């Protein structure tokens, strides 16, 4: 299951991405918003919680720039949220960072780019190997903050 959420700025793009994922028979958990003005940290926390607890395998967050969503989501232990505005970043953040939440800015990229970013993010596997050691060091930082 893929958790997805947006604030008001990302709502239209979120609606398009949901259609894209449903066309591929993917199961979606849409945590909101429904177009009304809202605060992106509330939405980011809901998606991040579902991913961190293993209820959803990955998450997608959309706001105006994608920055607020990524800052907020990365506060949750176990979350590696990546703000992506291009195909290459989306591919390599999966391969090297094992990112589990994709963040996008609805006001910074067009719908075609967003659609390609979503596809490659969801379809690309983590490479492991030396990259796992680096992920483990990120976990060490999280644990040192507890
Ligand atoms: C909302 O106006 C805007 O601040 C928000 O969508 C996002 O861009 C924050 O990072």
Image: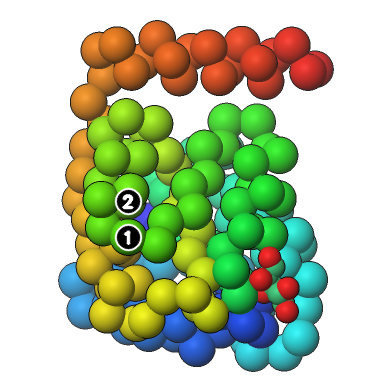
Is residue 61 rendered to the left or right of residue 116? Answer: right
Circle 1 packing at 10 Å, graded few (<14), some (14-19), many (20+), is: some
Is residue 14 rendered to the left or right of residue 32? Answer: left
Q: How far, Cα to Cα, is label 1 from label 2?
A: 6 Å
In the displayed structure, 48 sits above or below 2; it is above
* Ligand 1 under 8 Å from disc 1 Cβ: no
In the rendered image, residue 26, in percent from the top left (x then y), is placed at: 28, 66
Which residue is depicted at the point 35% across and 40% down? Answer: 93
**Residue 90 circle label:** 2
- Front residue of 122/113: it is 113
Which residue is depicted at the point 25% across and 12% down? Answer: 129
On-image quarter of the N terminus: bottom left
Residue 14 visible in the shown view = no
Circle 2 packing at 10 Å, graded few (<14), some (14-19), many (20+), is: many
Q: Quadrant of residue 102?
A: bottom left
Q: In which quarter of the image is residue 111?
A: bottom left
């Amino acid at each position: 299951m893929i958790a997805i959420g947006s604030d008001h700025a990302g709502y239209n793009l979120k609606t398009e991405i949901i259609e894209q994922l449903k066309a591929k028979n993917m199961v979606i958990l849409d945590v909101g918003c429904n177009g009304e003005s809202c605060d992106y940290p509330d939405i980011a926390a809901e998606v991040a919680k579902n991913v961190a607890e293993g209820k959803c395998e990955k998450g997608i967050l959309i706001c105006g720039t994608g920055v607020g969503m990524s800052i907020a989501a990365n506060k949750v232990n176990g979350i590696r949220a990546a703000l992506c505005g291009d195909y290459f970043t989306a591919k390599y953040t999966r391969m090297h960072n094992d990112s589990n939440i994709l963040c996008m800015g609805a006001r910074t990229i067009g719908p075609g780019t967003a659609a390609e970013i979503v596809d490659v993010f969801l379809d690309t596997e983590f490479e492991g190997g030396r990259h796992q050691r680096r992920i483990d060091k990120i976990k060490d930082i999280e644990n040192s903050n507890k």
